[in-house]
Image: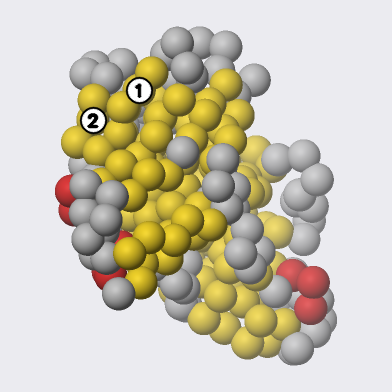
Amino acid sequence: GAVVSQHPSWVICKSGTSVKIECRSLDFQATTMFWYRQFPKQSLMLMATSNEGSKATYEQGVEKDKFLINHASLTLSTLTVTSAHPEDSSFYICSGLRTVNTEAFFGQGTRLTVV
Amino acid sequence: AQSVTQLDSHVSVSEGTPVLLRCNYSSSYSPSLFWYVQHPNKGLQLLLKYTSAATLVKGINGFEAEFKKSETSFHLTKPSAHMSDAAEYFCVVSDQSYNKLIFGAGTRLAVHP
């Protein structure tokens, strides 16, 4: 299968600061990337869908000004959590879609802790 | 609208005994269905997928699942559990373009000696 890499795998930051998480498709071009959030012992909730070169589509209830998504190239999407608060602490996972009608490949996730 | 219901939040089995993780789906059209596994603090690994071909789907690590349209089910099974199978399992449904994946709540599988 194809490889999606997230960086960092874990991060601790202070309240009020911003954190950037990178999601890279290492051996394929991802036309679409997805960002998910997972609370402890819960399922994955889709936050947003991004297509290379266009604005991300956010799911209902997700603040687009707080969770900035950039998909500037076919191999890189970034999620920036702005002015982070403790309630933003979570496990964030990205996935990349090679083309329509193909499988989505998931990154290993990033654990964000805001103190 | 599509949805997925995983009927058990926790399943506990003895090593060497069969595994059954239950999943029911709802979809207004022919769905694509997946099972993913997640080990602690790790990403997701695809076990198997159903995309309107054979109704019995074989996946990795000895897992398989059967698509039953009449029962709207896609249960995951394995004949003999290993300790390394202990993890969280997610049943997932998507439309044909894979553009949006809808995750079930997950089932935590525990395997004891």
- Mark 1 = which residue? B67
Residue A67, image x and y in percent?
70, 59
Res. A11 mark: none
Position of residue A58 measured from the top left corner of the image (x, y, whole percent): 69, 42
Quadrant for the C terminus of chain B, please.
Answer: bottom left
Three-letter amino acid code at the position of disc 1: Phe
Residue B32 located left or right of residue A57: left
Q: Report the front residue among A16 and B49.
A: B49
Cα distance between the residues tagged 1 and 2: 8 Å
Q: Quadrant location of residue B112?
A: bottom left
Confirm whether residue B69 shows in the render: yes
Mark 2 residue type? Val
Q: Is residue A44 visible?
A: no
Q: Element at badge 2?
A: strand
Write down the residue under mark 2: B57
Residue at x-position 35% and y-position 40%: B76
Marks 2 and 1: in contact by CB < 8 Å?
yes
Q: Secondary structure at mark 1?
A: strand
